[in-house]
Image (spheres, grey):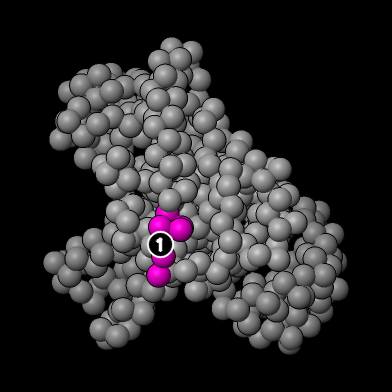
Amino acid sequence: MRSVLNQLRIIYAGGEPGDQEAFKLSVQTNGIGDARVLVAAEAIAEITAHRVDVLLVDVMQPSKDVLSLIRAATLTNVRQPVPVIVTGPQDATDRIEACLQRGAADYLITPFDARHPSLIVRRLKSLGVNGRQARELEVTQLIPRAVDSGTARPPARLGADSVDDAQRFVPREFLQLLARKSLRDVRLGDHVERQMTVFFTDIRSFTNLSESMSPRDNFKFLASFLRNVTPIVRQAGGFVDKYLGDGVLALFPGEPAQAVLAATQVQRQIARYNHGRRLAGYRQVRVGIGLHYGTLMLGTIGTVDQMQTTVISDAVNVASRLEGMTKTFDINVVVSGSVVAALPADHPFKLRGLGSVTAKGKTESVEVFECYDTDPDELAGLKTSLMPQWNAGMEAFREGKLIRAGRVFARIVELNPTDTVAAYFRDRSSLDVASQYRGRVWDGSEHLETK
């Protein structure tokens, strides 16, 4: 049991700071391998990616978060669900009982006592070990059916001993999607079609930044940057398809919410990364991220003696253009309407519609949204509180009533001077811009001239 305990992955969603610390200390001193404290959205992403063996849910957080967590844990697409232990104070028995009726396996009373860790970890061990063994058996049994039937489920990851060294240069997930065990099995022209979320990120003004560094320092900087980004993509359920020098092209085969979560986590990690750079006297780094959900064709191209894996899809181009829009609007994350439409109704992300946008080089417009979860608290709060005015301004802009739209956006900028997107649309709705469309058909779409 000791080796299994070392592999257990336990997440505590919510909880008071004191309970969170007692939880982490208790499991660490009892030989449990991976114990983390996450917010609801992060925990759901881990559940969806099958990286949780036991889930603790604090019942005192918002009810919608509690229900979403229990639903995600008990309705996973593997027949063995993730066991849920709800936690709460003695006077929260009604909430605890309601969670037990909805599928929770057990409960613990808070506050936790770190002096008696066995009171916390005893039930974690039994539920975690039994649940993990059952799920591993279930996944093993599912592999042949998933491959033989041609369903979208990728085969389970191969053990390290069966993976040749060359696979360090090709994403293992890519091979799984092609239903190939090894690069030796890959053939020219192998391909598969999938619905995925494309995650495209790029370092702002990297050319100027790189000019101040030697080639050696450039490599060291990029390696450091990618070490901060890649693990977040993987933990959220995606994989890196290509490193693009100063950027990353990643794919998320699961729910689009996983990609949005990864985007917010990357931005938070970049903020922490910048803190270290600032202390060391280095220039700060800004990163733009574009997300688009669509159909992809993954496969191999080239010649028999020199092949490479690639993704062929307009969705990749759209994601790249969306990333470019982050520079135009001076924001961090832009997502397409197809991503937003695929999010669950109770998703936790802060989104603001930017209307219909036609990027340079494209003929069709795309509905786009700003995700402002990682904005400073004051800025994010103002964006949320001014949403009715924002929606009124966007509606006027769509209808070609640019003078009215300009007034609305100007008022938003007065109330929130740091809102760069409102300032952009204020300027685009000026008299000069309105005169450009005199006598022309207004299509309700903003046409961007930069990539």
Q: Is residue 190 above or below residue 310?
A: above
What amino acid type should be assigned to the residue bearing mark 1? Answer: Pro
Residue 22 image position (x, y, % from top left): 44, 68
Q: Which residue is at a point 25% across and 84% down the rendered structure image?
A: 280
Residue 74 in magenta? Answer: no
Q: Secondary structure at mark 1?
A: loop
Q: Which residue is at a point 47% across and 69% down the rendered structure image?
A: 113
* Residue 389, image quadrant: bottom right
Pointer 1 local density, CA inside 10 Å: few below 14, some 14–19, many at least 20: some
The residue lying toward the viewer, choosing from 211 and 369, is 369
* Residue 205, image quadrant: bottom left
User: Residue farthest to the top?
Assistant: 148
- Residue bearing mark 1: 117
Quadrant where the N terminus is found in the figure: top left
The residue lying toward the viewer, choosing from 59 and 420, is 59
The magenta-colored residue range is 115-121
Q: Which residue is at a point 43% across and 12% down the rendered structure image?
A: 148
